[in-house]
Amino acid sequence: MIGHPVSTPSLVPLDVAQLDRWWDFDQPAASEAKFREELAALPGESSARLELMTQIARAQGLQRRFDDAHATLDGVEAALAGQPARVSVRCLLERGRAYNSSRQPDRAVPLFRAALDQARAAGEDFLAIDAAHMLGIAAPPPERLDWNLEAVKLTERTSDARSRRWLASLYNNIGWTYHERRDYARALEYFEKALPAWEERASAGAIRAAKWSIARALRSLGRNDEAWTRQTALLAEAEKAGAPAGYVCEELGELALAHGDAAAAKPWFARAYAALSADASFAANEPQRLARLKTLGGDR
């Protein structure tokens, strides 16, 4: 991995090991609060401060506070002169994520492409992989698989251990791209590859999501009994951890419905609706799916 020489204390990069510890993607408001607490200890317009501001913008976007996210990034952009490439790359990435999450992928894609080009030129492997991974999400559907596979190549070539952690997300994204193409067997293959990669990262929520994806692909393959066994085990696991289980309940409803038992499916859909209607992101991005859950759960 090629780095930039550090000439002054103000150009010292953000400590990414600390950043990883501070981030809780399931609790973006708490993450934002932590970032603001740490921001107070960093000198004004230092590289580390500007990088951390981009992460505040990311946390704001995850809370669907997109105007706030863009305002935060405007502040970063105004101070980019003389900063290392990684600061600009982070700004481009988070601006793109804010646009993509607010359903403006046409504005996001050029930013992700610029981030990828700049990160590659600067030898910023982790950020280059992030940009390619985001293109695998935001680019037009026919291009997504190629971008995800390009991100895998970048990941496999890097010597940076932190960058190699991207494999878990990439396998997951490739799995969903194949699933969208109705190539369910290939989707299952990648979901099964993603699970041990998530287990290496010891992220309980991501591990549960990976298990859910495997079971979902099994349903698409018509292997409903196996899917039911996996989803019920996952429900018990989530309940024991006090974790949300709306998606699991939705799948249990779908499996009961596939078995021809609408009466058994109804309470599962009702539970799924109760959980997922409280999820602002789901409600904003999946209105038809949420309406279906409401109807099948008996609340017309």
Image (cartoon, rainbow, N blue to C red):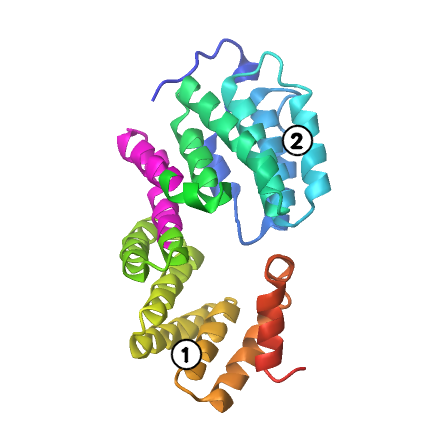
Q: Nearer the viewer, mark 1 or mark 2?
A: 1
Q: Residue at x 42, y 44 (%)?
A: 142
Q: Residues within 10 Å of mark 1 (few under 14, many from 20)?
A: many
Residue 157 vs residue 136, the one in the foreground: 136
Q: Is residue 8 magenta?
A: no
Q: Secondary structure at mark 1?
A: helix
Per the image, the residue denoted by label 1 is 255
Residue 7 vs residue 130, the one in the foreground: 130
Q: Residue at x 50, y 37 (%)?
A: 19
Per the image, the residue denoted by label 2 is 73
Horizontal side of 31 relative to 150 (left or right) equals: right
Residue 43 vs residue 6, the one in the foreground: 6
Counting residues from the N terminus, which is met first, the one under dot 1 or under dot 2? 2
Quarter of the image with the N terminus in it: top left
Amino acid type at circle 1 is Leu
Q: Is 72 placed above or below 64 here?
A: above
Percent position of residue 21, x then y: 48, 42
